[in-house]
Image: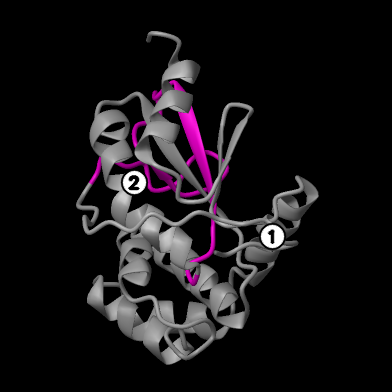
Amino acid sequence: MFALAGLGVVAVVGAATLGSAPASPLNQSGRPVLGVASAPIVLREYGDFQCPSCGAFFRGIEPQIKARYIDTGRVRLEWHDFPWIGPESRDAANAARCAGAQGKFWPYHDLLYQNQGGENSGAFTKDRLKAFGRQVGLEAAAFDRCVDDDAFGSAVQADFSDVRSQGFNGTPTFLIGDRRIVGAQSFAVFQAAIEAALGGR
């Protein structure tokens, strides 16, 4: 159960992993998106790469949303950083943005969730984050510099401040229109919210 201010987060554990997907690596605001730009529904995810419930969503629910809605062009997933667990969360968020600068946010995102460890226990040290970059084929010198310099640190902090200003206090949190979903809820919960937003489209 992972949350701030006492809000519980439900975890659902699954075994599937995400493969490739149609993706615009960044939207017009520079935010990572998965899916086609013309998708009528935006699913906003507010996550922390150290959060086990976020990892559970990635493994168990996101592949179902991807297959049914993202791959069919009806939903696009938009990533927002909510790195509340600690310094490794912030470093991982920065590194993912560094990967995004080379067009590989989503492969890096997937690799982070596949390599979660205990909170601030060394799973996401800067050396390990750099090694992950090599695994997804990033240009090493530029990526390492970006990680060491915390190049996107202010952008990550801006996301965190925006999330808190909206009153979010648990990860993962999702928005589908004005509907808020907290935690790795069942696919049925997401399906109902998405179908309501689609309105028969």
* Helix, strand or loop status at disc 2: loop
Identified at 34% across, 37% down, the residue is 35
The disc placed on residue 160 is 1
On screen, residue 150 versus residue 41, left or right, reads right
Q: Identify residue type, mark 1.
A: Phe
Identified at 38% across, 59% down, the residue is 56
The disc placed on residue 61 is 2
Give the mark, 2 or 1, whose residue is nearer the N terminus: 2
Q: Which one is in front, 160 or 32?
A: 160
- Mark 2 nearby-residue class (10 Å; few <14, some 14–19, many ≥20): many
Up the image or down, 131 lies above or below 171; here it is below
Residue 28 at x, y = what percent? 53, 38
Residue 73 at x, y = what percent? 30, 26
Q: Identify residue type, mark 2.
A: Ile
Magenta span: chief secondary structure: loop
In magenta segment, residue 45: yes
On the image, which quarter does residue 90 sit in?
Answer: bottom right
- Mark 1 nearby-residue class (10 Å; few <14, some 14–19, many ≥20): many
Residue 148 at x, y = what percent? 53, 86
**Residue 191 appears in view:** yes
Which quadrant would the C terminus be assigned to in this image?
Answer: top left
Up the image or down, 52 lies above or below 117; here it is above
* Helix, strand or loop status at disc 1: helix
Question: Magenta part of the protein: which range?
Answer: 21-50
* Label 2–label 1 contact, CB within 8 A: no
